[in-house]
Image: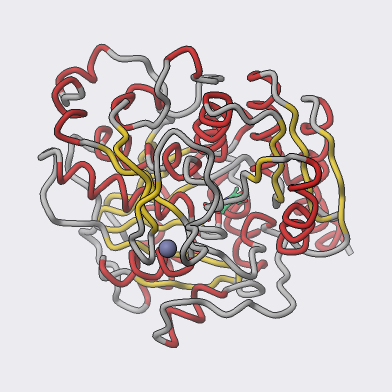
Amino acid sequence: MNVTHLECGLCGLEHEARQLHNLCRNCGKPLLVRYDLNRSKTTLTKESLASRRADMWRYREVLPVESDSNIVSLGEGWTPLLRAKKLGKVVGIHEVYIKDESQNPTQSFKARGMATAVSMAKELGAKKLAVPSAGNAAGALAAYAARAGLKSFIFMPRDTPRANVVECEQTGAEVTLMDGLITDCGAEVARRKDAARWFDVSTLKEPYRVEGKKTLGYELAEQMSWELPDVIIYPTGGGTGLIGMWKAFAEMEEMGWIGSRRPRMVTVQAAGCAPIVRAFEQGHRFADEFPNAATTASGLRVPKAIGDFLILDALRQSGGTAVAVTDEELIAATREIGAAEGIFCAPEGAACLPALRILVEDGLVSTSDRVVLFNTGAGVKYIESFTAELAESAD
Ligand SMILES: Cc1ncc(COP(=O)(O)O)c(C=O)c1O
Ligand SMILES: [Zn+2]
């Protein structure tokens, strides 16, 4: 209702709203949704939020669905921002918070993006939705498609955590397991989608997942009383959440909700698959495909991200950085966070802790900085990662 058009994130070409789109028809890069924010802010005010629903649809006027009847919801968003006092003490930072996205439907932050993508697919008349996924996006698509009465077709690497495969099967998706990586799954969707009449909802290949993910930025601001943190550490695969938060900050500034100060945005990736870290260090705007990608944090096993330049632009414009941590470090961190704070993180989310340690050591984060770590999913979905570790330590 407040959407004016879609705009290419690279070349700026405008595309018509209210039509199904994938990538920019000029340059093949991701499209971003633009709003008449002057209109949005007439009813969406900070004061109005106090009495609104406790999910991400509280920011209704900056979300793309036109008719309320098309909203497909399972209660996503408005997750807690938890102070992590003990961890803060251990790393020497006074204020550390964990945004706990494991408390979403389907136990990950992917629920936010799929709620908007599926709602828009329903509104614009798509019937069959296809996605390549590292696991959590698949579980979320399957659930939201089921709720919307749409069919979902899911392609995952054969070694995706078992829980992700089972949840998709139990929520009515058609699941194909493939030898290879998420990029191979994406190529398979691209090859078959026209003949099969699938709408491709791959990360950033459709414009609306990022709109759901951007509510992370709105929530963070609201939960921190409109004073953004100094540092955000985000486990980055395709980068939707980071790109979404960066977009949310710009929208909030345009509506006069926040000033021009931004958190330093930090990408954390696994050492075995760190294309963004490498591109950041080399000063490149686009990231080369990372060879032989391997990590137990399956959501970080994304060797090539189509939104690479949007991630890298945000890191640089914010004065942030990109760091890689080893699988040993992120698995150890899962237990450390669990034991200290009672939050059983996904290994991707746990990676934020060793990343923070590196930043402190390098003098990039100081004691008085307010730091937010993103726990993007639930540890229980990764039993294989932890039981393998237990088996090894018993040897
Ligand atoms: C738990 C978890 N964390 C992080 C990511 C990476 O997310 P993004 O694609 O937004 O960078 C994923 C993606 O699959 C994930 O499942
Ligand atoms: Zn373009």
Residue lying at 13% horizontally and 55% vertically, measured from the top left: 260
Residue lying at 38% horizontally and 65% vertically, measured from the top left: 10
- Please tell me which residue lies in front, 195 or 367: 195
Residue 283 place in picture, x, y as percent:
39, 85
- Please tell me which residue lies in front, 245 or 346: 245
Q: Quadrant of residue 394?
A: bottom right
Residue 7 place in picture, x, y as percent:
36, 52
Q: Is residue 130 above or below residue 267?
A: above
- Please tell me which residue lies in front, 208 or 377: 208
Q: Is residue 57 above or below residue 82?
A: above
Q: Is residue 111 left or right of residue 143?
A: left
Q: Give the quarter of the figure containing the C terminus.
A: bottom right
Q: Which residue of the protein is positioned furthest toward the bottom in this rendering?
A: 282
Residue 324 place in picture, x, y as percent:
53, 73
For ligand 2, give the image quadrant.
Answer: bottom left
Q: Is residue 205 left or right of residue 367?
A: right
The structure's colour scheme is secondary structure
Q: Is residue 100 left or right of residue 220?
A: right
Residue lying at 65% horizontally and 45% vertically, measured from the top left: 200
Residue 320 place in picture, x, y as percent:
31, 69
Residue 131 visible in the displayed image? yes
Q: Quadrant of residue 379?
A: top right
Residue lying at 40% horizontally and 48% vertically, measured from the top left: 15
Q: Give the quarter of the figure containing the N terminus.
A: top left
Residue 343 visible in the displayed image? no
Q: Is residue 260 above or below residue 383?
A: below
For the image shown, how many numbered marks are present on the structure? 0
Q: Is residue 330 left or right of residue 166?
A: left
